Image (cartoon, rainbow, N blue to C red):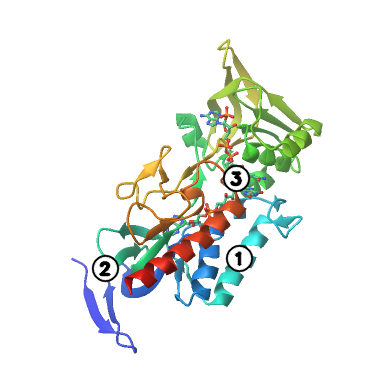
Amino acid sequence: MPLSLYARTTDGRPVTAQIWGYKMSDTRHTKVLIIGSGPAGYTAGVYAARAMLEPVLVQGIEPGGQLTTTTEVENYPGFTEVQGPDLMIKMQEHASAMGCDIIGDIITSLDTTKRPFVAVGDSGMVYTADAVILATGARAKWLGLETEEKFKGFGVSACATCDGFFYRGQEIVVIGGGNTAVEEALFLTNFASKVTLVHRRDELRAEKILIDRLMKNDKIEPLWFHELEEVYGTDSPLGVEGIKVKHTKSGEITDIPCKGVFVAIGHAPANELVKDTLELHNGGYVSVKPGTTETSVPGVFAAGDLTDHKYRQAVTSAGMGCMAALDAERFLAEQE
Ligand code: FAD
Ligand code: NAP
């Protein structure tokens, strides 16, 4: 049994400390709890703070969200070109300057069955809230191959900006045909001697401007109608030596020697906190009433990639973050 100590903070709030479990627990109430620190979360923070709702924003494991895993962002209005991580620091500073309380914690559970809603942080902090804005975004998808799993972190990656540097002068493979795959392939040419883009069709779904850049880049070779079959390499030390790909029509197997494999086959909504409690659509995106950010539970709002299987852009996520804060403000006013 862990030893629990009970005390009160100087302002009278109860505090419990669990000696054995290394967890401190404290309860914090807020009118609006924002979960997630991507464009949706920070924009919700700006608007909720300006509505005097004194929001608390919990950042999660990836402060700044997906844009911190990329380099140039060229389509966020107001910035002809800005580095993704820089843009997210500006958004964080903006939310903070307006009065949003930004906390480095991860929400591990959320109870939306009663009000106030109760969220528990990995730190042990218990957050209670009159309204919740979910902005947990999306995470990279994996193919689910055994050998992909084996070499994850040892030659297999889903983040070129994080890991590209390790492959200076080496041959690299990128899997996928969307904006992420094309951007990663282009970025990786800064390090690699050659990048092979393996795609299951012969048509990319990336933006035209990116496809144009890809086709003009001598270091990139597209390989159409192929899927990853297997990653192989050495066991000691663990490292990738190549991949085997299968032709989607003929079934023929081809061997591609390479040191790095970047999987860029899309993103899935980060719905773990609510997948059993809120209505979902299109395989896991949180449903909202059309034209609003209202979920199936009154007082719980959702914004950004978590709800959006269609646009999934920084600017649309930011727009939905704004809507969620305004929707939460209206909901709280009606409650009063
Ligand atoms: P995300 O950015 O996904 O952020 C989710 C947040 O939720 C994170 O901060 C995470 O820590 C937090 N979170 C998750 N779970 C929890 C939890 N349990 N507790 C607390 N917090 C939690 N879009 C563009 O418009 N232009 C681009 O150039 C562009 N480039 C991209 C490049 C790459 C490589 C990728 C992957 C995406 C790119 N996108 C781009 C898409 C864009 O990044 C997303 O549409 C946008 O970031 C979605 O914002 P969001 O706020 O919904 O969520
Ligand atoms: P995406 O647009 O969903 O593309 C995923 C790609 O991976 C598709 O080409 C798909 O093939 C392929 N794929 C999916 N599952 C596969 C599998 N099992 N095996 C092989 N290939 C598979 O995902 P994304 O590129 O990550 O982009 C996600 C969102 O972020 C998009 O809305 C995108 O616009 C946005 N984003 C924007 C920018 C930008 O604006 N510059 C940059 C990055 C991302 P098919 O084409 O055959 O389906």
In front here: 112 or 291?
291
Q: Distance between the residues labelled 2 and 1?
A: 38 Å
Amino acid type of the residue that numbered disc 3 sits on in the rendered structure: Cys
Disc 3 residue: CB within 8 Å of ligand 1: yes
Quarter of the image with the C terminus in it: bottom left
Q: Is mark 2 within 8 Å of ligand 1?
A: no
Horizontal and vertical percent for residue 83?
70, 56
Residue appearing at x 71%, y 51% in the figure: 72
Q: Which residue is drawn at 31% across and 74% down?
A: 27
Q: In this view, does 328 lie above or below 211?
A: below
Q: Mark 1 points at which residue?
A: 91
Is residue 108 in sight in this rendering?
yes
Q: Position of residue 86 (x, y in %)?
A: 67, 62
SS state under label 3? loop
Q: What mark, if any, has residue 20 been given in the picture? A: 2
The disc, 2 or 3, on the residue closer to the chain's N-terminal end is 2
Q: Which of marks 3 and 1 is in front?
A: 1
- Figure quadrant of residue 252: top right
The image position of residue 31, as x and y in percent, is 38, 72
Is residue 83 toward the left or the right of residue 148 in the image?
Answer: right
Going from N to C along the chain, the mark reached first, 2 or 1, is 2
Mark identifier at residue 159: 3
**145 and 299: which one is in front?**
299
Choose mark 2 or mark 3, whichever is in front.
3
How many angstroms separate mark 3 from mark 1 (CA)? 22 Å
Residue appearing at x 70%, y 51% in the figure:
75
Frontmost of labels 2 and 1 is 1
Q: Which residue lies furthest to the top in this view?
A: 250
Q: Quadrant of the N terminus?
A: bottom left
Which amino acid type corresponds to the residue marked 1 in the rendered image? Met
Nearer-the-camera pick, 268 or 49: 49
